[in-house]
Amino acid sequence: MAIQKTHQKVKLSKPRSPIFVLTASVACIAVLYLVSSLLLTPRSMRSLGTDPKNRHSLHEKYLYWGNRIDCPGKHCDSCEGLGHQESSLRCALEEALFLGRTFVMPSRMCINPIHNKKGILHQSSDTVSEERWAASSCAMDSLYDLDLISDTVPVILDNSKMWHHVLTTSMKLGSRGIAHVQGVSRADLKEKSLYSNLLLINRTASPLSWFMECKDRNNRSSIMLPYSFLPSMASKKLRDAAEKIMALLGDYDAIHVRRGDKLKNRKDRFGVERSLHPHLDRDTRPEFILCRIAKWVPAGRTLFIASNERTPGFFSPLAVQIGIRIKL
């Protein structure tokens, strides 16, 4: 009897509602469309998201300062010292960190040839500035460990496929994709939706140097990255080389004494020659250096002096007076 009753219910069940059938059909079509769109995604697009080495995507926002350190600006044709460039690069990285954006890092960094010529202030002017810059530049990833930097500030190189993809996408988005800014404060870039929601901010840096954008560096609380940040991010090859050199040198002290290019005179408005740095010659002479280092460098230590002083034996009195072994 129970079976017959159940059978009766099946017989008498009402047909499904047309609305329910229509809804189910639409849902199936939507699922099929989603699956097909994923399968038909171009290979290049899929590889950007699936490559385990690639941490970046268009879900991120990007900050671009230029294709060279301190360029755009009047330093585009010159090549400043490594410390100068690191100050500029650190400033740009700090802004990216403050804005929560990925920094588009120049793919090359120039190494001033003066550091390879023992202080001789002479460069051939025969070659074109562009060629000279290229010849004296190194790949950024040969100098720095970009993965290590990205642990603190995400970076991509400006010759990468990801950067090309960001550029093309930002151009397609038009005003919603990119803003070319100059003289806009970091706070405005972060807080105003006009900038904060954009895929790419093209920051035109100071015409002087990038580090001029970090105007509050005298305020210690505004420094987000320490001065030691970039030196500690050296590439593995450079770190390995440094360790081998340190093992050969043993324990030592080192100072940097800059004289040669700073001991210059300039005529004032009355035609009188005056030194640009009046006390530099006095303060960098051996007897004054001795007073400054006496507390930290005891007799018998090995002291390395990095200097562009041209006079042979200029620092010898240091060795004579306190028995320091001088290495130039």
Image (tube, helix red, strand yellow):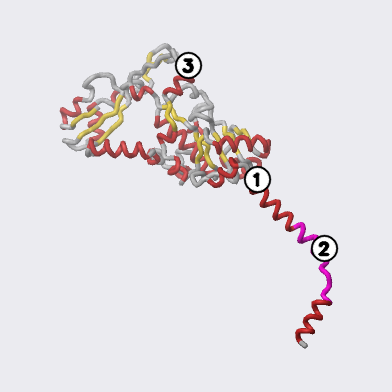
Q: Is mark 2 on a helix, strand or loop?
A: helix
Near-viewer residue (250 or 146): 146
- Dot 2: within a 10 Å radius of its alpha carbon, few (fewer than 14), some, or many (20 or more) residues? few
- Dot 1: within a 10 Å radius of its alpha carbon, few (fewer than 14), some, or many (20 or more) residues? few
Which residue type does callout 3 highlight? Val
Q: Please state the total of marks drawn on the protein image.
A: 3
Q: From which residue to which does the magenta span run?
A: 12-26
Question: Relative to 109, is 114 on the left or the right?
Answer: left
Which residue type does callout 1 highlight? Leu
Q: Mark 3 points at which residue?
A: 128
Callout 3–callout 2 Cβ contact below 8 Å? no
- Marks 1 and 2: which is nearer the front? 1
Near-viewer residue (201 or 208): 201
Q: Is mark 1 on a helix, strand or loop?
A: loop
How far, Cα to Cα, is label 3 from label 2? Answer: 75 Å
Q: Is residue 8 located in the magenta-colored stretch of the structure?
A: no
Q: Mark 1 points at which residue?
A: 40
The image quadrant where one finds the C terminus is top left
The answer to which of marks 3 and 2 sits earlier in the sequence is 2
Q: Is residue 20 located in the magenta-colored stretch of the structure?
A: yes
In this rendering, is residue 309 above or below 86?
above
Q: Which image quarter: residue 139?
A: top left
Q: Mark 2 points at which residue?
A: 19
In this rendering, is residue 273 above or below 58?
above
Which residue type does callout 2 highlight? Ile
The image quadrant where one finds the N terminus is bottom right
Residue at 81 percent across and 81 percent down: it is 8
- Marks 3 and 2: which is nearer the front? 2
Near-viewer residue (296 or 133): 133
Callout 1–callout 2 Cβ contact below 8 Å? no
